[in-house]
Amino acid sequence: MAEKTMRLDRFLTEMTALTRTQAKEAARKGRLTVNGVPVKKADGKIDPAADTIALDGAVIPYQAVEYYMLNKPAGVVSATEDGRYPTVLDLIGEKRRKDLFPVGRLDLDTEGLLLITSDGALAHRLLSPKKHVDKVYYLRYEGRLPEDVCGRFREGMVLEDGTRCLPADFEPGERTETGGEARLTLREGKFHQVKRMMEMIGCPVTYLKRLSMGSLVLDESLRPGEYRPLTEQELEELTRS
Ligand code: URA
């Protein structure tokens, strides 16, 4: 039983945007109740799964972990804090809990699927180089594709600094006068990998968007900057893979 309990101030700092000092202050001012009973101190133990905690009368739901799918827009960084640019967590809003983080990174100018969670174990599994989780990107490029483009990606490309990439699937799409569009499936996540691979074939990327990661597919009804919780099914499939 004992391991199921936690301090009230820790519950508040994890489930809300309150700091520990603010939690203490809220209790002192009589703003907090546990099972309807006002508490004056925030250092007591509660059972988050069984007790009902409310702040100013509003119940704070307990979730051990949270999962959101974000359609990352260009111009925000995939980090928890940044001195220059807004972060993907700023998009989740002021009331977010503080243990959320993005799973992996997309470049500042890359759009598309980003999983935001507080589940470190799942993030570790999805990012592990040994797991080879598929990541599908849509891209637009400039220039003309070489004849053997699919083969060059399939056999494992060597980047400009000698780094060898795992085999990847390149599917050319529509062509324009100056370039075209394509889908690229990678099974790893090296720094600027899509852009560097496309540079190697002489076709620099002009637009990049991640469409999926493992079983998780970007919900196209989310506009850039919008997010939603994962559905039960998405979560089940993701944790099973
Ligand atoms: N590859 C890149 O070059 N950039 C990204 O943001 C993701 C993959």
Image (cartoon, rainbow, N blue to C red):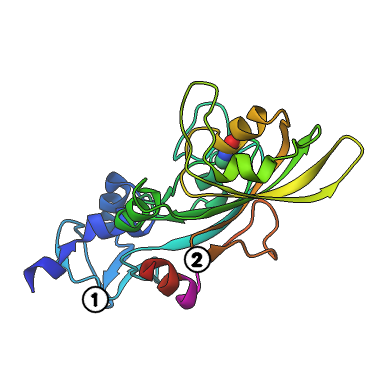
Identified by mark 1, the residue type is Asp
Task: Point out the residue furthest to the left here.
Answer: 2
Residue 27 percent location from the top left of the image: 27, 58
What's the residue type where badge 2 is placed? Ser
Q: Give the structural element (helix, strand or loop) at label 2.
A: loop
Q: Secondary structure at mark 1?
A: loop
Ligand 1 quarter of the rendering: top right
Residue beneath the point at 76% across and 37% down: 145
| Within-10-Å neighbours for mark 2: few <14, some 14–19, many 20+ | some
Return the mark for residue 215. Answer: 2
The residue most toward the top is 161
Q: Which of the two residues, 36 or 213, is positioned nearer the viewer here? A: 213
Q: Residue at x 16, y 56 (%)?
A: 43
Q: Quadrant of residue 8?
A: bottom left
Q: Is residue 175 left or right of residue 147?
A: right
Side of 69 relative to 34 (left or right): right
Which badge, 1 or 2, is on the more N-terminal residue? 1
> Percent position (x, y) of residue 197?
60, 34
- On the rendered structure, is 164 left or right of 77? left
What is the C-alpha distance between the residues marked 1 and 2?
A: 35 Å
Magenta residues? 230-234
Q: Where, quadrant-wise, is the N terminus in this rendering?
A: bottom left
Can you identify the residue that label 1 sits on?
Answer: 51
